[in-house]
Image (cartoon, helix red, strand yellow):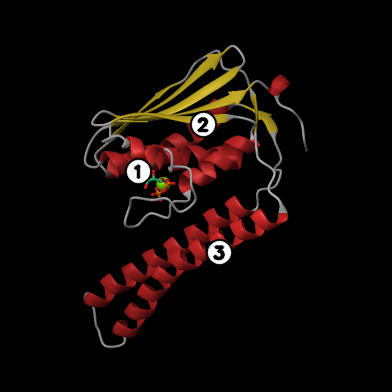
Amino acid sequence: FRKELNHVERLSLVGQMAAGITHEIRNPMAVVRGFLQLMQEKSPPTLDNYYRIVMEELDRANSIINDFLSLAQNRSVRMELCSLHDIIRELTPLLWADANLRGQSIEVRLDDELPNLLLNQKEIKQLILNLGRNGMEAMGEKGELTIETRKRVDGVELSVKDQGPGIPAAQRERLFEPFFTTKSQGTGLGLALCLSIVERHSGKISVQSEEGKGTMFTVFFPCPENVESWM
Ligand code: ADP
Ligand code: MG
């Protein structure tokens, strides 16, 4: 269910988003500018370090722009009947490498009975990566990330579970708001993007979290025959 916005509401939303994105992109740009200035006077190895920071900040600005664009272009995307498991298997090496660097592990449990679903592969990859990265970022030095699929009567469930500190109740309602972040390097666009992807797939996303134990995000995808075709 998506509320139809009237013209004024839409304009004010665009204004709020523009303010948010401007602020987010100015930070990395200011850092890059400052370091480029410093680089004039330095030699290696200081220079190498500055060079790395500049590249990281440019990448960051780039990913903010990408996330923001995907969020803003809330248009219909091409859906194909495909296997969620193929998408997960394609992503596993990437997630595994990321987890390995952090000293964490990944457990994947796939339900053999899963039907094919109407999906946009690129968006579902993005969804799983965002949820997976959040889980890993929450866990710190060690811990296990579990990715699981389950067949349900009327669709399929995908869950991404971590052993991080959990999410305080007061924050749970704000998680999906654009620009809501508790991380110093966060953009707060990851979950907003997840929600818009799930909505485009006529699905649902929910979160269960227990402080001190961990967090589990669950996405529900309806069976293809129950997906209202609006493309
Ligand atoms: P970002 O990761 O850039 O902060 P997100 O939209 O991905 O933005 O997440 C928003 C916020 O939700 C995070 O800053 C964090 O506070 C909280 N959050 C999301 N996933 C988890 C998780 N698995 N465990 C704990 N907190 C989480
Ligand atoms: Mg995130």
Instruction: Sort mark 3 into few (<14), some (14-19) or many (20+) by Cα contacts within 10 Å.
Output: few
Instruction: Sort mark 1 into few (<14), some (14-19) or many (20+) by Cα contacts within 10 Å.
Output: some
Residue 79 image-quadrant placement: top right
> Which residue is denoted by mark 1 in the rendering?
98
Q: Which is closer to the viewer, label 3 or label 1?
A: 3
What label does residue 205 carry, if any? 2
Q: Locate the N terminus by quadrant.
A: top right
Element under disc 1: helix
Residue 96 in the image, given as x and y percentages of width and height? 36, 37
Give the answer, above or below, for where 212 lies relative to 114. below
> Which residue is denoted by mark 3 in the rendering?
18
Tag 3: residue type? Ala
Tag 1: residue type? Asp
Q: Is residue 46 among the parts visible in the rendering?
A: yes
- Mark 2 or 1 closer to N-term? 1
Alpha-carbon distance for marks 2 and 1? 24 Å
Residue 41 image-quadrant placement: bottom left
Alpha-carbon distance for marks 3 and 1? 32 Å
Ligand 1 quarter of the rendering? top left
- Mark 2 or 3 closer to N-term? 3
What label does residue 48 carry, if any? none
